[in-house]
């Protein structure tokens, strides 16, 4: 496990270095993210790596505290959040910053499209017309910058990407239930991920929308459910470690983290039902 400390952050840091040097981040071994992710880490790459990592962790903790307050302890003790900070993944930070509704929301989502898959449908209902114009303008400008810096990045990224069959073996959501040996997991992943877009957009409550879409997110790993951290409580903390136990600690081949979005969806449904009863009684 020690060899995994800062593993993903190190890759992102090298990607940022590659951008500053005019090189292709996709040439870095195990760097599978899109070019916008490397551009996002270019400012970090200007600093010594330990300092950059400390700032990165500090940003995660600051925004987690801003969103959760003292309740952040439940999230910090959960496996997905601890692992996210340990390896230096970006899912949690994006989930905490993008919903602020800043003009940078779409630009940040470009750094990790599978996180945008979960966040954007709810955000689409929240932003007003002017907000969307700002987000689209900044997103387009950021995308234009990426093409200006490296016009061939999309082709390089697509040629570098492992196939969906490879990624589906890391499933840590609903797709974990489908035997990866069957060869059907990748196909079912695409079909159900597309299906989930509509109810994910229709659901008005943020927790319900994100939980449903996280349950069917097409590309997940053991840290992916950290995007739901703002609603973690003692139950989700316990379920996160139960998932580790059920999977036998095999972090490389996914875990049944579907327990967490299912728990949050059930809590959202129960709260909705209680609100309806209270409205009826009054």
Image (cartoon, helix red, strand yellow):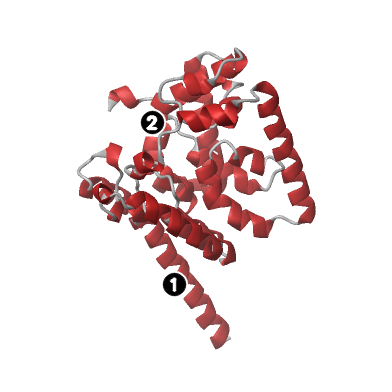
* Residue at x 41% of width, y 57% of height: 261
* Residue at x 46% of width, y 48% of height: 229
* Residue at x 60% of width, y 57% of height: 122
Residue 208 in view, yes or no: yes
Residue positioned most to the right: 130
* Residue at x 58% of width, y 31% of height: 154
Residue 4, position as x, y percentages in the image: 33, 26
**Image quarter in which the C terminus is found:** bottom right
Label 1 to label 2: alpha-carbon separation: 34 Å
Query: Would you call the spot at circle 2 few (<14 residues within 10 Å), some (14-19), or many (20 or more)?
Result: some
Q: Is residue 110 above or below residue 151?
A: below
Residue 119, position as x, y percentages in the image: 56, 51
Labels in figure, total: 2
Between residue 30 and residue 267, name the one nearer to us: 30
Residue 158, position as x, y percentages in the image: 51, 33
Query: Would you call the spot at circle 1 few (<14 residues within 10 Å), some (14-19), or many (20 or more)?
Result: few
Residue located beneath label 2 in the image: 86
Between residue 83 and residue 255, name the one nearer to us: 255
Q: Upstream in the sequence, badge 1 or badge 2?
A: 2
Residue located beneath label 1 in the image: 270
Q: Is residue 265 above or below residue 123?
A: below
The kind of secondary structure element at disc 1 is helix
* Number of the label disc, if any, that sits on residue 100: none
Residue positioned most to the left: 248
């Amino acid at each position: 496990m020690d060899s995994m400390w800062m593993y993903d952050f190190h890759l992102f840091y090298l990607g940022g270095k590659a951008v500053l040097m005019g090189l292709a981040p996709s040439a870095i071994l195990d760097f599978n993210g899109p070019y916008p992710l490397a551009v996002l880490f270019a400012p970090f790459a200007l600093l010594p790596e330990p300092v950059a990592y400390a700032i990165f962790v500090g940003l995660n903790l600051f925004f987690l505290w801003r969103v959760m307050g003292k309740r952040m302890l439940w999230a910090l003790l959960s496996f997905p959040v601890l692992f996210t900070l340990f390896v230096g993944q970006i899912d949690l930070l994006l989930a905490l910053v993008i919903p602020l509704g800043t003009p940078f929301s779409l630009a940040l989502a470009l750094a990790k499209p599978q996180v945008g898959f979960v966040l954007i449908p709810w955000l689409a209902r929240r932003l007003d017309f002017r907000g969307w114009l700002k987000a689209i303008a900044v997103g387009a400008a950021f995308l234009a910058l990426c093409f200006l810096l490296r016009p061939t990045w999309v082709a390089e990224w697509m040629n570098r990407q492992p196939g969906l069959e490879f990624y589906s073996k890391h499933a840590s959501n609903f797709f974990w239930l489908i035997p990866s040996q069957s060869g059907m997991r990748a196909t079912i992943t695409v079909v159900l991920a597309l299906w989930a877009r509509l109810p994910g957009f229709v659901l008005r409550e943020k927790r319900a929308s994100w939980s449903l879409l996280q349950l069917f997110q097409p590309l997940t790993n053991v840290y992916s459910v950290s995007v739901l951290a703002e609603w973690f409580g003692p139950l989700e903390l316990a379920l996160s470690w139960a998932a580790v136990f059920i999977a036998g600690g095999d972090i490389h081949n996914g875990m049944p983290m579907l327990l967490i979005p299912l728990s949050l969806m059930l809590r959202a449904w129960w709260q909705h039902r209680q609100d309806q009863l209270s409205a009826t009684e009054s």
